[in-house]
Each structure stands twice: as C-alpha cells, then as structure tokens.
Image (cartoon, rainbow, N blue to C red):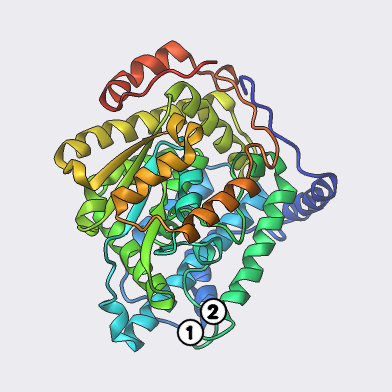
Amino acid sequence: MSVGFQVPPFPLPMRAVLGAWKLAARAGVGVPRFDEAKMIAEARRNTGLHHFGDDDFVEPMRRLFYSFEEEAGLHLLGRAVMRGAAVRALECRLKLSQLRDLHPELVAQPVERPVFITGMQRTGTTKLHRLLSCATELRHLPSVEALRPAPLGRPVANEPGDFERRARQAKIAEWGMKYLSPDLFAIHPIEADSPEEDVFLFDVTFISPAVDASLSVPSYTRWIREIDQRPPYAYVRRLIQLLLWQRPGRYLGKTPHYQENLDVLFDVFPDGKVIHTHRDPRKVVPSFASMMAHTGALLADDVDGAAVGRRVADQMANSVERAIVARRAVGEGRVLDVHYRDLIGDTMGTMRKVYDFLELEWSQASVSRMEKWVGANPQHKYGRHRYTLADFGLDGDELDERFKAYRERFGVERESD
C-alpha cells in the first residue's frame, strides 16, 4: 500500500481505451508478449537485415524479458511500451552491425576528449547538460537520436532528410508523454528538440539502469550489479562512434548512472572528462523517488510509494559509495565537482568554471545561447514538482546517516526545508 504517493490517473479517453483493451485481453487478444523469437523476427523484418554481429545481448535480453513477465507487474500499455523499446533496440543492433561492415571508417571513428555529466539524479544534471549543450564546440545527444541512434531506411544509410524523419517520431513520443503524464513531464520533460540522456543508449545493450530504476525487477537488479560493466560501456562507445559518424564533434554525454561506474567510464574513454554534480540527499532521494513513481505508473499496475522510496535510496547510496571509491583512483584534473546551490545561485559564474575546466572558448555565441535557454526555461515551466519524504516512507535522519560519508567527501550542505 502506498505511503503518500497516489498514482495519477490517465486521461479519461485513455482510460476508456485501456478498459476496452483489458476486455479483449481477457479473451486472449491483443496482449503484448515478450517472445524472444518473434521479436527478433520482427526486428529483422522491419530492417531487412539479419546479422547482429555478436550474441552478447542474448543473456541480458532474456533476463530482462523474464523480469518483465514475472516481476514488473506491467499493465497492457506498459507491456506495449517496453516491447516496442526492445524491438527498437534489436533494430538498432542490426543496423549498427551492417553499418560497421559497410563503413570500415566507422569502426575507427575517434571519440576524442568526450565530456560526461553525472551525479545523483535531481542534482542539476539536466540543467547543466542543457546549458553546456549551448557550447558551439560540443556535440550532444538529442532526443531524436536517443530514441533511434541509427539512421532509418532500408538499406540503412545516412541520407538527407533522415534526421527529420526521426524527429517526427520523437515529437510523437513527446506529445504522448505530455498527454499521458503531465505531472511526470513537469518533473523531467523529454522534449524532442532538447538534449537527452545517454541512458537511452544503454537500452540497446539490454543492460538498462533505467529499467532498474523505474520498475521493481529484483532479479534483474541483482544481476546487472554483479556483472562486469565494461561490455555494455564498450557497446555504448560503438553507439557514440555511430552518432559522431553521422554528425561529428566533441561528444557531450550525460546520465546519473555513470556515477556508479566512473572507473569503467574512464577505462572506456581514457581521455574523457567528468563533471560531477552534488546536492543534499534529503532533497534528492524523495525527488527522484517521485519521478520514478510517476514513471512506474506509466508502465505498471501497482506503484507502492514506500517500496519506490526504499529502492531509490538503496540505489543512490550504492551509487555514491562506488563513486567515492572510484574518485580515489582518478586524478582530480579529470573531474570537476559542481554543487546544485552554485548552479542555481550563480548560473553563469558556475558555467564559466565549467568552460575553463573543459578548455572551451567563453564566446559570445555560447553565452548568448545559454542566456536564451535560461530565459526560455524558467523553473517550474511545466508545473511545480511537489513531494515529501513521507510520501515515500523516507526518514531524513536515516538519510543523513546513510549519506554521511558522501556529504563529508564532497562538502554537501543541508538545504533548508
């Protein structure tokens, strides 16, 4: 039973559609199934391609599908969404395999001095990412490519008009999220024309920290934390090479999930630099729990606020503990710490420090673009995000104790309530 969080209802027309869908499902009609053979056949049919190049995705895919079927409690819409995402991932793998065969230069595509933003969720990573995306020297991941990293078409080709076709699909996805869950959109808008997280690239590996965060999938959660993370990170590097092959530049990536694997990140991107954001865990943990509860409600029948709170707190504590260990082995010149209070209180002063760290030109063009973004994106643009510790069964004193080492290591101060 939920502590304080209440699942927001879908809009009335959608509830009517889902009601009719449920009736059909009771008769065995229209239930999206995670049938490995059929989904692989569908991806091959959609692309006209056959070879995946390797089969290292098979075990992660099977474990993920097991959790979808047996643990996640997905409702019909959730099943359809996650099945569609899995088929897109399979299509992307087929396309990347073909493109690497056809274009040997893609295999050797350099990823030079990439920049990665990470930190606990809700610590200002999104604002920092979108501001830094204004730098003329950096090449970010837009939502369009996050949803479909590889070009469309049969055969696959990097052709004029391809990006626009993918952009139309991203616009439909943006509209759908805004319609189905305006509260979630107010917490973290996914806009088709905005930078998006690298976590979408990990979906293609089937080792997805996004699934782990948004759904209750305990066997999958245990497994992805036990395995070697280098293979999925190496595959994400291939995807970044694919992105740079389509549109060159100095890559700018972002996801909070990098925080728990900083050692692997630097192994795979040895000349990379990281900006590490920080904020009071008393604010961060319930805020992200709220975000994941809203996300879960889009996908699953039962969303227990207390269970989400426990899961998020455990994941965040594990993440910062791993980051503290990794940071001991990383030269300080490769990581810049940015505090949320500074990013909000002195935005342009903080960005100047970031530019200096990354050796970017503090040009009038980049400054003007940042100022324009700030003016167009005031806080609470899509509505106010309201949440409390109690909504998710969390205790502030317990969080203080769990994150004591984190506060001390990075000088994270308490925020006023």
Name the quadrant of the C terminus.
top right
Q: What residue type is labelled 2?
A: Leu
Q: How far apart are marks 2 and 1 (CA)?
A: 6 Å
Quadrant containing the N terminus is top right
Please name whichever residue, 234 or 324, is drawn nearer the observer in this view of the structure.
Answer: 324
Q: What element carries label 2?
A: loop
Name the residue furthest front: 364
Residue at 26% in and 56% down: 272
In the displayed structure, would residue 227 be above or below residue 201?
above
Locate residue 96, reporting x and y percent.
39, 76
Percent across and percent down for residue 52 are: 37, 75
Residue beneath the point at 43% across and 58% down: 363
Q: Which is more toward the observer, 170 or 139?
A: 139
In the rendered structure, which amino acid carries the disc numbered 1? Answer: Val
- Image location of residue 7, percent across then percent down: 69, 33
Residue 152 is labelled as 2
> Which mark is drawn over residue 156?
1
The reply, left or right, for residue 372 in relation to residue 360 is right
Circle 1: element type:
loop
Q: Where is residue 309 in the image (x, y as percent from the top left)?
A: 50, 26
Residue beneath the point at 52% across and 57% down: 195
Asked if marks 2 and 1 touch (Cβ < 8 Å), the reply is yes
